[in-house]
Every structure is written in C-alpha cells, then in structure tokens.
Amino acid sequence: MTRGFDTAEFRDRLARAQEAMARQRLGALLVTTEADIRWITGFLTRFWESPTRPWYVVIPAQGDPVAVIPAIGAPLMARGWLCDIRTWAAPDYRDDGVSLLADTLREVAPDGPIGTPFGLESHLRMPLADFARLQDAMAPAQIGTDHGIIATLRAVKSEAEITKIRAACSVADRAFARVSEIAAPGTPLAQVFRRFQMLCLEEGADWVGYLAGGARQGGYEDVISPATNLPLAPGDVLMLDTGVVLDGYYCDFDRNWAIGRVTPATQSAYHQLLEASDAAFAVAAPGVTAADLHGLMADILGVGPEAGRLGHGLGLQLTEGLSLIPDDHTELRPGMVLTLEPGLPTGEGRMMVHEENIVITETGAAYLSTPAPREIEVLG
Amino acid sequence: MTRGFDTAEFRDRLARAQEAMARQRLGALLVTTEADIRWITGFLTRFWESPTRPWYVVIPAQGDPVAVIPAIGAPLMARGWLCDIRTWAAPDYRDDGVSLLADTLREVAPDGPIGTPFGLESHLRMPLADFARLQDAMAPAQIGTDHGIIATLRAVKSEAEITKIRAACSVADRAFARVSEIAAPGTPLAQVFRRFQMLCLEEGADWVGYLAGGARQGGYEDVISPATNLPLAPGDVLMLDTGVVLDGYYCDFDRNWAIGRVTPATQSAYHQLLEASDAAFAVAAPGVTAADLHGLMADILGVGPEAGRLGHGLGLQLTEGLSLIPDDHTELRPGMVLTLEPGLPTGEGRMMVHEENIVITETGAAYLSTPAPREIEVLG
C-alpha cells in the first residue's frame, strides 16, 4: 500500500466540495477538526492529541485551500499539496490566530457567506471565546452551517481510501487470528488488551486508535468499558473490538471467543448475530437505506426498533457518516464503507455484539474484514 | 497503583469547583469534553474516539453533578460515583439530548447563569446546531464563560493524580531504556515507532496515546510528523516523544539517541539542552512563573523569545494548563505537573528537543521522569 494520496485525489475532493458550495452559494468553508482538515489537506499527525493549538483550513469557492495554522505545523503541512500556508506562533495569548483567520476569510470570501460543519457528529474545534471574536471580526458576515457538505462528501470513499481501510482491516484480521496466543482461562482481561494491541502493532498497525471489549459469563456488560484485571474464566464470552489505524484510516470490527467451553445459549446467540449480519450483507447495495439494514437485522434479532444503532460509517474516524437506525434514510452509494454491528441481550445485564466492515459496490457489497468463523472459537 | 479514585477525591474536586462557581455567581457549569467530564466523574473509556454521540455533565451550584448522556454509556457511568444519570437513545436525529439537557439545566439552575469552558485550549464538544437549539431553549438565560474555573482547577493535581502520572512516566522510562533492542543503523523509522509502542505496552501502558519523533543527520525536521520508512543511518539523531496512558493519565517526554556515531556538534547540542532543563528544574518552585522558566531556558539556549513554547502542563491530557512562553505569568503552585522542553536549531531545517516531566512541591520540584543520561546514548 502506497502511503498518502496523489494530489489528484485532493483536487477531486476539492472539486466536489466547490461544486456543492456553489449549489449552496457559499463563499468559503472553514474546517477545524483533525478529520476534516486531513480530508482536504492530507495533514496526518498524532499532534492533535494536544488541545493547546487550534488549526484552521479555509476552502474558497474557487482556488486552492488556505491553511491558517500554528508555525509548529508548517514543515509537515508544506510536505503536502497546499501552497498557501499562513502561520502564527501559537499559543499567542493576545491573538491566537483569530486575526489571521479573519483576514484570510475576508480575503477569499469578501461577500461571504461562510459555512462550517454544524450538524450531527460535528463540533467546532476552537475556543468559544475565539469564535465570538471571529464572528465580531467578520460582522456583518456570519459563519453559519456548511449544509452538511463535508460530512456528505467524506461518506463516499475513493478507491485509494478503500485500499487503506482494507489494509487496516487486514491488520486486525491477522491480530484477531492470533488471540489464542494471548488469551486463555486465567489471563487477566487487562493483559489481553495490552497483548492484543501489541499483536496489532506487530501485524503492521501504525497505532491502535481504539480497543474496547469485555469478558463475563455468557456475555459482557457493555461494549465501551476499559479492561479490568479480572481473569478470564470458563464460560466467559470474550469480545475485543478494535480500531486499528493505517495511514490515517480506521477499521472497526470485533470478534468473540468462548473461554474454556461453550454453552448452547452462547452458540445460539452467536449464530443469530451472524445470521443478522449475513442478511444485511446480502441486501446491502446502492439505493438500499441505512434504515432498511437496521430493520432487517432488528427483525432477525427479534429486538425491535429499540435495538439501538446496528452499524455505522467509518474511515478517517472510527465512526462517521450514516447510522443504521430507523430514522436514517440515507441511501447507500458505491464507495460507502460501513460496519454491520448486530447486538443481542444474552441475560440480565449481559450482551453479545458482532461486527463486520463492508464497502458498497456498484452492484452490492464486499467484505473488507474477513468474515468471522461460522462457529465461535473456544480458547483454552 | 490502585485504579480509579476514591469518591472523596471527586467530592474534593466538586467542592473546589462549587467554591469557584460561588465567587463567579454561576448557577451551573456545563462540561462536554472527555477530559473535563472524566475530571469530575471518573468516566474513563476510549469510546470518545467515536464522534457520533455528545456527552454532557452539569455541575450545579449545590449538590452532585448530573450526567446527561447516551444510554450506551449508562452502565459504565453507573459504576462511578454519580447517582443522577439521565440518558437518551443516541443518535436521535430529532432531538439528540438537547431537550433533556435544557430541562436539566433549567432544573438545577433556574436563575442561571451557566458557564462552560470558553478560553484557550477549550472547545465545545457538541454540534453548533444543537448549541444554538440549547441557547434558544434556555433563553433569556445564556450559556457563557466558565471564567476558566475548570482549567484552573485541573492544573493542580492531587497526590493520587501525581501517583498515576509518575506511574505513566515509569512505563515510558522502562520502554526508553530498551530502545537499543529495537533501533540500530538500517532499521526503518516506522518499524522503530511500531516496536517502541509494543515496548510501552509490554512495560504496562494501557495504551500509547501519543508517539512522534524523527531521525535525520544531526537532528530532525520537526517534532510532530509521523514516521517514514527511511532507515536509520549513521550520524542520525533519533528522537522519540511519547504520551503513554495509564489509568487515564499521560506522561509526555522524549529521549534522543545518536545512530552509529556521535558528532561533537550533536554532543554539544545535547549538553546545552540538558543544561537548560537542569537550570529550569533547579529554580522551579511555588511562586516562580511559567515565563520565568521560559526566560531562563531561552537564555541558556541563546534563542531569545522567539524560541516558542519550552514546556507545558500535562495530566488528563498530553498537554494542558500553563505554557512556558514569555506571556504566561501563571505562578507555579504545589501539585502542578509540567514538562521542561528546551529545543535548539542544529543546522538548516534541523532541530533537537529534550523533555522531562516534573511536579512542583512545597519547596521546589521533583522529577517524575527519570532524567535523561548525561551523555547521548549511541545505538549500533
């Protein structure tokens, strides 16, 4: 897999953004978050882990994007495709890039209006005090909604992006296939978590952006908790759910194991989960909606609309884009990458969840993860 | 190290927050980000990697905080010290928790005003469209600044927090001590990055929240870039800068190595960096300011005020709180944890950076990282 993207990839993204901006009569788009900035510039760094500095990219109605960023990021940004990189010495307690950003916005969009992501899953990554200062500096022009342009464009992946997500899935596939090396009755769950991340790295992950899971009798309590030191016990169902990062792209899927022995109830739940994701995979195709996939899986699971989210988009982030819920009527399109994530209650305060990653093709769907074994694997 | 905190720790944080709120006549505080919510509730999960769902915690002027969160997080939140946990089935495209949050704010602070983090390093982790809806629902009451209350309180760590940061530093210490096992002339830098993260996990990290670095002749180009596949070459200076996470707390320091051989110029730069951090450590004490430490190090480095940030606070995040810059006149207080991070240009487009973690005590400072060796280690 080649690292990064050709400039043509970014020019295509820019063209699609500007086409959508023209339809909405936007003079510029302002993006502030890691994923949105990386989508349009290719700027890839773990430095976002530091909340100190804000980062801004302005997408004009015509012409190339302008980066308005802390000086510390200039060498890395300059290695990408953007030429117009404006910097300040952040953090600056008197003016932390606000004047530079306001000047840039006025220059590229003198007549406004300026859009920024406003809707579901978005946030503005800058201090509210600075946003108020920016609005004052731009007045009477106001910064308003981007009409979902960025999120909508990000939801459909290019071939080059799909290649990266497939490679991330392969890393997780290989790590999952080796879990018998690190987990057996008596192994503390926290040790399984540490060793599993090591396996992901050994198999080629750049880093392990996400790991959650659980292990209790006949299921687990939830799917977002960190690991405890409780040792794995016979009868436990172990689940690991990981988001491995490769060249900035995530996979997001899980696997289940039975510890020591497997009960008929666990086997039955496992089969039901596979049946649900198999059925959703079989019908997933352009024109089918997110709600359709949810309804189909909820019926097989017998859980009704209160089932919660049964899958979602992914790519530059662990989760992004559509949600498999009854209210999401987004039509699937070729290039959309999503998880199928059916879940089932398996007794008082217990559950099991299964997850696969797929891509929508012209005629249907293809797996990016290697589908889980047909029978739950028993460890130890 | 015991995991988590006693409830008394959170009650103390709450008491200090409410004392500051009383001084500012705030009716409630609204917090929305991972670190702020974890600081007051103890809610620790990697699920924040998913941007889909907003999370809210309301700190009233009197009484315990109220969590207003997606139902998927209720079991984990209920294992903590909060009793009042209000949930909705997120994502809800019609009302994603906004009404529930507005009702809660009106209930606990009928007369307002409500503060939320507004200043440097902060952001509001909720969609702007939902923030506008919330402001409408609260009108005429408005949500305004928290006057820096949360950031100021977070900057001073308790003994229990310092214990966790010290443990995270020890993990990184042990991993850094083993770098000769994974790096030698010819090793691709990307492999060093992967193997170093494995060492951190093997030495006890819960996860590796941050890793950056570089390796070029006589220095590196910047300190935020991801690794390339370029093999280490004799004459390179290798730097690894890591933020290992243990029970939710970060360390943040780096180490340098000479590859194959060391030049007098590299030795000299290394000594100068150590001299700067040694000097800052020697004077760091209550009442000394962040700007004092910056000035002292900048003088020794001979770089003047344009040196950039030469250190910062850390703890729940990789960077937080004060900045060692000329404009930061924050007085150090016992319990503040910070990095000393002197950097030097070492030729055209090259630099070297050195970093240690320290805690301010009643009488001075103590190292949390084991100080770097007095001479740069040569690998291979």
Image (spheres, coloured by chain):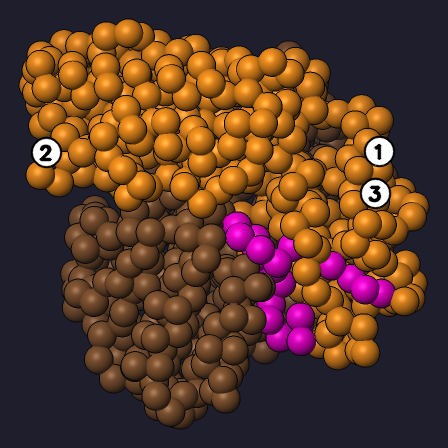
Chain colours: A orange, B brown
Q: Secondary structure at mark 2?
A: loop
* Residue in view at x 44 percent, y 14 percent: A282
**Percent coordinates x, y for residue B177 in the rendering:** 43, 30
Residue under the image location 23 percent in, 15 percent down: A271
Q: Amino acid at mark 2?
A: Gly
Real-space CA distance between mark 1 and mark 2, rounded to the nearest whole angstrom: 52 Å
Quick one: label 3, few (<14), some, or many (20+) residues within 10 Å? some
Distance, label 3 to label 2, CA atoms, is 51 Å
Chain at numbered mark 2: A
* Residue sitting at x 37%, y 27%: A296
In this rendering, which labeled residue sits more in front, label 3 or label 1?
3
Q: Is residue A115 magenta?
A: yes
- Residue A36: in sight, yes or no? no
Q: Nearer the viewer, residue B61 or A148?
A: A148
* Residue matched to label 1: A11
* Mark 1 residue type: Arg
Label 1 SS: helix
- Chain at numbered mark 3: A
Question: Which disc, if any, is residue A19?
Answer: 3
